[in-house]
Amino acid sequence: MTDPYLVLGIPRDADDEAVHRAYLEGIKQAPPERDPERFQALRAAYEALRTRRDRLAYALFDDSPPTPMEVLDRGAPAGPSRRPERSLFDALLRGKA
Amino acid sequence: MSKKRKQRAGPKRSASPATAGPDLAEGARQDLASGRYREAIAGFKILLKQDGAEQWRDGLAAAYAGRARQLMEKGLLKEARAIWENRAQLGEAVTVDPDHAAVLLQLGEVETVMRLYRDRAAELPAEVAAELRSHLAAHLLAGDLDAVGQLPPDDPLRVQRATAEAALAAYCTGDDQALASALRALPFRSPYRDLVQILKALQRLSSEPQEAGALLARCSRSGGFAGLRRAAELALVPESALADGLKDAGEATRRFALALRGWGEERQALWLEQRKLGAEPAPQALLRQMYRHRERLGEEWVRERGMRLLIEDFPQSGDWPRRCGGEPLSIAERYRVNAWAAERRGDPDDSLTAWIGYAQLLKSDPDAQRPGGDQAVRVALVLRRCDDRMDLLGRAAGNGDRHGLAGTAAEFVEESLAYDPDDPASYRRLIGYYLGEQALKDARRLVEQALARWPQDLGLLTAALDTALATGAFKKATGIARRILALDPINAGARERLVNAHLAHARKQIRGGRQDLAGRELECATDWAREEGLRERCELTRAFLTLSEAPQVGREHVRELGEQLGGGIAGAFRIALEASALGQDAASLVKSLRLIRRRVAREDLLSFLQHLRTHLDDAGQVSREVGAVFEKKLKAAAAVQLSFQEAHAACETLRRAELDEARAAFAKAALKRWQGAPIFELHAFEATYRGDYRRVSVPALERLDRAIERAHAEGDRRTLVRLEALLREADGFAFGPPPMEWRDDAEDEFPGRDELRVLINLLGPAKVLEQLGVSAKERKRFKQLEREVGTEALIDALAAMLEETLHDVGPPMDFPFPLRPRPEKSPAKKSSQDKEAPDDPNAPRQLDLF
């Protein structure tokens, strides 16, 4: 699974309360009807880190390798959506791919 | 992308088509349909030269268009233009294609397109003209003001361009009010209509992605705004599909989509670097990239996540972190990666060994000595890992192997409780395992420990109830069941357990002669029994209480109850079960009650089978004594007409009950109606031979083989698997291992009583006696004895006698039994042979069993 700390946007030493808060905040931003994939990821991350025992077990036993996207999210997280520059509109309108 | 563009190139064909005739025409059409445009062009050219027919010209035009689009997709615009021009030269009868105009606009030949639009737009089909307008609209919006001046003042392209420009500018500067106003001003049939949909969609990308997708779907896939539409759609694809979507995207599309997704320059640069590693980077390559950016990613994160990339190639990969510029793996890290790798290999023993090795290492940390602390909980989790992952305790299911993998896992789970005592799930698992293994003392010990910590845990209370029942502590069981029901009043399972506990206690009192106490227990049971089934059970036990107090009245009471329960074998079965539970002679009682009718009715049979199934679900087995009461009647009942499903279910139930003679009868009866049906062949074979495959005949094996073929042909996978396993077993037994041989020097290796008991059970006492050369008269006496003391007791006695005799005189020459039974000889003939050849060394020795 994708690093659940990254999915929830919390540090490795987050406690039960911080995990819960991040989960609630996450699903508020990505409710299942709007972004089902993100919602599922949040749910799985929350299940993996909910209690102290869960977090210790995740660190010990989760053997899923990092994906390139995960490295990307960690190294340079995506920010809020930006409006593309006018020059990009013009290029696409001229038929540039 | 237009439908035409979607055509995929088929397998390559020779570019030199057949020279003439229908083959050439058919080949050209096929090439066109399969996207082999070059071959199609060659074919249609020849055909057109031959007779100049319109159909060949249309075919050639379509082939040119297809080829030109292929070249456009590859970015070969000049080459595409040449092909479009070839197409245009086919004459004015060939309709102008808007994609031709698109290529010309991209190559800067705006004047040509403007001329085409001015001179021919009016005569073009409406949809072609609209698409041509759309291409021009996009071009004009991209800033070609010279071209705008060439349009008539009232042309919609010219009139509405300023509004479209205002809308686009407003979106880019974030002026949503101006944007909304401009969009409202663009009419529905505007050549800029697609832009309206796209800008509305872009406004809704984050807040209403589904609506945004719907708006984009309304735009043309081949007009002038198609590129913008594709880029906007890429901003909407889920994260998991993004890499695929970006694979073929050009720079403008990618940057447009990624800006909308919030990707900054750093992220895009890192992504481009990753793209060079391939779609699925090799673990070592990704690790190298992670270490290269470890300052940005965080040293600890790279180390921890990077360890997961070592698993597949471990232990060879153990050196990768050092080679990537990091610290070598520590001992603890090596243990962990090794354990993950063992799990991936899938060998439970390896996995257990690896995790326990890691646990030993963790235990050496002084922090691990503080129960409940992080390090101690880590030790506990590692000790429980194999059971958690493989459900070793749950799957042990009372196999009696305390020294096997499950037994070892149980020891580690027990040990884990010292490090992490606050885990009720581990207690529940251990209690369940010990109950299954009949280790009641251990189960009781853990129940006491767990309930002291969690007195109101329903799962633990249920485990405690099961433990109390298993140990015969009925009074305690009722107390626990009351606690469960106080916490969870609608807990039907606990209610049933409670009633059963009271009934079991009542039976115990009846057996002990304490009818007064039994009566009280029965009253308690009745108080708790809400469901009809439970009330019936109470009534049944009460009838037996009466029977123990007043046999005449009681017998009548039991008989009446048997009739109320349906009578016949169904009612008799319930009574036999109760009698057996009370330690009474079920066979005599059932016989004396005369409940079983001469002919078993269909409803009676189905009801009996249903009760049998329920009993098997609850108790797991039917005692041999109870089974024997019904087996003969059931064999006769096999003639009852059942549906295929009912007959199948009957065979399965009888298999579970180990009533194999009856099962064989049902299977054979079913085979008369459904000849060769694989499932009944399976039951007939299994029930006939019952694991003793030494006497399997070749025709029987051949029938099994045919059943396998049929199950395969019918796609009955479940039966197929069972039949194949059965054939392997039977075949291997019949032709595989040789019979055990006695060695002269193996005097101290005579089989023990248990082994003899197994052998006698396998063959049946009658067969054993026959093999030992016991005379028919004596065998009859054994049969009589069997009736008097029961089969089990006879087998025990036989095993004991044989053991003693073998030690005294040694085994008979052919003991324990040949691969195939020898032809039977009449006792008289055998006797005469004995007389004729008294010194025959191979003659079976008659053992003195009495």
Image (cartoon, coloured by chain):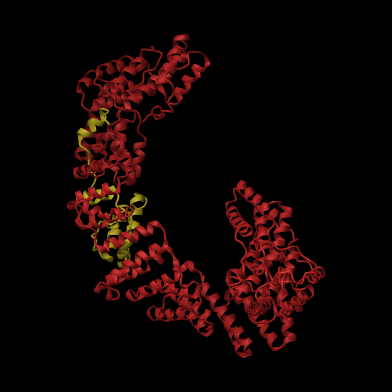
Where the C terminus of chain B falls, by quadrant? bottom right
The image quadrant that residue B551 belongs to is bottom right
- The residue depicted at 43 percent of the width and 17 percent of the height is B16
Quick one: which residue is furthest to the left in this view?
Answer: B295
In the image, taking residue B788 as reference, residue A71 lies left or right, namely left
Residue B397 left/right relative to B135: right
Q: Residue furthest front?
A: B839
Q: Looking at the rendering, which quadrant does residue B557 occupy? A: bottom right
Residue B400 pos. (x, y %): 51, 72
- Quarter of image, res B512: bottom right
Quick check: B468 above or below B102? below
Q: Position of residue B487 (x, y in %)?
A: 45, 76
Q: Which chain is in red here?
A: B
- For the residue pair B398 and B58, the one nearer the viewer reads as B398
Colour used to depict chain A in the structure image: yellow
Q: Nearer the viewer, residue A63 or B218?
A: A63
Position of the N terminus of chain B, as image quadrant, is top left
> Is residue B302 in sight in this rendering?
yes
Say left or right for B468 vs B283: right
Residue B611 seen in this snapshot: no
Image point (72%, 64%), residue name? B603
Q: In terms of depth relative to the viewer, which is nearer, A41 or B829? A: B829
Against B3, residue B797 (above or below) is below
Where is residue B475? Give x, y as percent.
52, 85
Total labels: the figure holds: 0
Give the image location of residue B384, x and y in percent.
37, 68
